[in-house]
Structures are given as structure tokens and as C-alpha cells.
Image: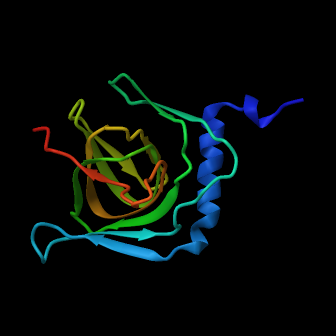
Amino acid sequence: MTSSSTSRPSVRVFALSLVCLSLALLGTLAATVRPARADGPTVTVEWLTGPTAYPDEIDALVKVKLAGSGTQVAHTRNPDHVRMARITFDDGASLPWHTHPGPVVVSIVEGRLVITNAFDCLPRTYAAGQGFVEPGHGNVHRADALGRVVLYATFFEVPASGAASIPAADPGC
């Protein structure tokens, strides 16, 4: 007999993402990230869910192996504060250097997004139909849109304050 406690962590993280996606109809909050110039392109974050609590004990392990880099591991011991967002980038919009409190699972549904991580300064492009996992926990990166981009992101370990993104210093890439 197989129990959920013997499931691989990646399966559990995938299951959590599906739960968050199913809760997307409960959304309420929207925010816009403004560029340095008032007339420039923007990034709009529409929160589809409030903090989602799980009554079950969850222990998730996320391993990310990027081409040309080592493996990043994010151990999420209490991914109880989960939020899901629809994020839209205007053509040419970007999110400056930042990190996240926990892992973020991203699915791109429109356009192309360039992610540059501070640890290797290599730009990686993800297109509609692709996704990536941002391990959070201090992994500093930036995001730049190539055209209009729409994506869905599931944020783990969002604190009660709701801060899913933490600004970071420019690493000089």
C-alpha cells in the first residue's frame, strides 16, 4: 500500500501547484509595479488567491538544475502560505533585481521572458508554453519582457505581510 508520505517531493510540489491553480477563481487583489519613468511599460500583478493554508503537514524539496550551473535546492519546511498570481508585463517592462521568501513555480502563457540570475549573470529566455522554478531563499534575479508577457506564478512561503518579492541590490551583471 502506498501512502502520500512516500511520494517524491517533486510530485508534492506539483500537487500544491495544482491546488493553487484550482483556487484561482477566488482572486481579489491587484497591484502594478511602476517603472522609473511614469510613461514607461508596467508590470501588473493580479493576486488570484489570498494566502492559502493547508491543514496537512507538508515538506517540499525543490531542486533546480540550470544549464551551465550547479543545482540549487530550496527546502520548504512549511509552505503553508501559498499565493497565486497572474502577472502581465507590457512590452519592454522589467522587474529589477529581487528575490522571494520561498520557491516560485512559473508558467508562461504568452510572450517571452528573460530571467537573469545574479549568481552567473546568464540570461535565460522562457517562451509561452514553458515554465521555470525560481528557488527563492535569497536567489537574486531580474525579469525582462520580450514583447507582452503573461504568466501565472505560484509563490510558496509568502509571509503574513503578503510580501512575495524582496528587492535586492544590483549585482553588476
Q: Residue most toward the top?
A: 70
Whether residue 46 sits left or right of residue 167 in the image: it is: right
Residue, x 44% and y 58% (percent of image)? 160
Q: Nearer the viewer, residue 66 or 34?
A: 34
User: Residue at coordinates 51% horizontally, 69% vertically from top-left?
Assistant: 48
Q: Which image quadrant for residue 30?
A: bottom left
- In the rendered image of this protein, does residue 129 appear above or below residue 39? above
Figure colour scheme: rainbow
Residue furthest to the right in view is: 1
- The residue closer to the viewer here, 56 or 74, is 56
Q: Along the horizontal axis of the image, is 102 left or right of 93?
A: right
Residue positioned 13% across, 44% down in the render: 170
Q: Nearer the viewer, residue 40 or 98?
A: 98
**Whole-percent x, y for residue 89 in the image:** 31, 65
Figure check: 60 above or below 112: above
Report the quarter where the N terminus lies: top right
Where is residue 69 shown, x and y percent of the image? 33, 24
